[in-house]
Amino acid sequence: MNLDPLDELLQAPAFAAGQQVAAFQPAVESCLARLRAAFPRYVEFLERGNSANGTLNSIRPLFLPILKSVDFPLPEDMPIVVRLTSSGTTGQPSVTPLDEPSWRRRLQAMRGSYETLNLFTAKVDALAFLMDPATTKMAGSLVIDAVLKQMPQIRSVTYLAKLGAKGPEFQAASAGAALAQAIERGPVVLVGYPALIAAAIMGLRQAGKSRFPLPEGSTILTGGGWKSFLPGVALDREEFQAQASAFFGVPRNGIRDMYGLSECPAVFVQCERGQYHVPAWALAQAVDPETGHDVRPGEVGLLQLTVPLTTSYPLLKILTTDKASVQDGCECGLPAPYLTPRGRVTVARYETCAMKIGQAVARPEIRG
């Protein structure tokens, strides 16, 4: 029995050389064919850019800000199992509808990265500094929850925040009590928004704890929350990791950050040298917004992502408003390229070719 091209791509070593993996182009072609069959308006958008043959360079990217306000009508016979939302901390949240295969592949992709990087070396209890998924559809909470519950090394998952009627609800004192209880059973993994972990550190210090060493084998895995997640909280990634390492007694290579977007099924996880490697099922490019062409390795451009794992919505190739550089040669030895996030731009700064990319789908007749 022949494997689905998209699932075959997920069988590749997680951090092989990205688009050089033999299964990548067939997966792109298969994903594109399914999207063309399901979304007529997407076909119209593609054909305006001569995106007919499915080669990587010919496929027009969708400009991410447009997807914040424009919906592609879903086929009536497409069963959606989950709708992921972005945090919405920088504006209107986006919604990503996923059918069962797209949801399954997203989880498999993240798990593949976790396992290849050997993030969990012992049985651990997970303390999630995330919104309880029972109270939110935010992508970070739902995806991480599902993946952690698939990992045999994770004994339990406890959520320390929830989304209430007036917004996020988090009590640093309660988090400290849960942490003290958890470490009695052995190693733990703290996972979630660094702003909430920082708030817990502050609360423990105010309670008289200058340090709170975690058992050997404990790790810290952060994702998102570098933006203004909590009022008045601004964090620098390097500074946070240094403080967390000193306070919790976790070595720096045991503190990893994740970079990703709710619209993209690929998550970029830091290696032991702190670089965000691009998994084999993704192509990450730093492009010049004026020309759409790649900038030179190591130079800063707009981040463009091609990931052929979602067939329930036209997210095959997206152009983000995040600045990034992409290059090879990480000292950790992984052959995959790595990207370096360089902050976010305002849409107004790029009201040129990048904006025009999105205007083709911003017409009233395709709004959902």
Image (cartoon, rainbow, N blue to C red):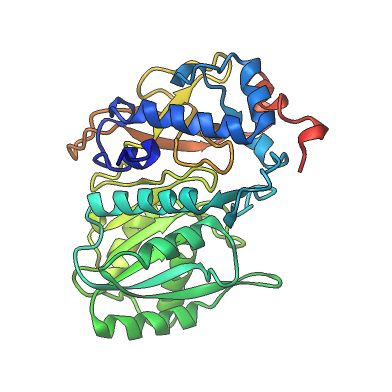
User: Which residue occupies the extreme front position in the image?
Assistant: 1
Number of numbered discs on residues: 0
Q: Quadrant of the C terminus?
A: top right
Is residue 261 found left or right of 76 in the rendered image?
Answer: left
User: Which residue occupies the extreme right position in the image?
Assistant: 364
Do we see residue 279 in this rendering? no
- Can you give x and y, in whole percent of width and height, for residue 56 in the image? 45, 21
Q: Nearer the viewer, residue 20 or 163?
A: 20
Q: Nearer the viewer, residue 353 or 350?
A: 353
Residue at 49% in and 77% down = 172
Do we see residue 310 in this rendering? yes
Q: Quadrant of the N terminus?
A: top left
Residue at 54% in and 44% down = 263
Does 223 sit above or below residue 274?
below
Q: Nearer the viewer, residue 256 or 209?
A: 256
Is residue 33 found left or right of 297 in the rendered image?
Answer: right
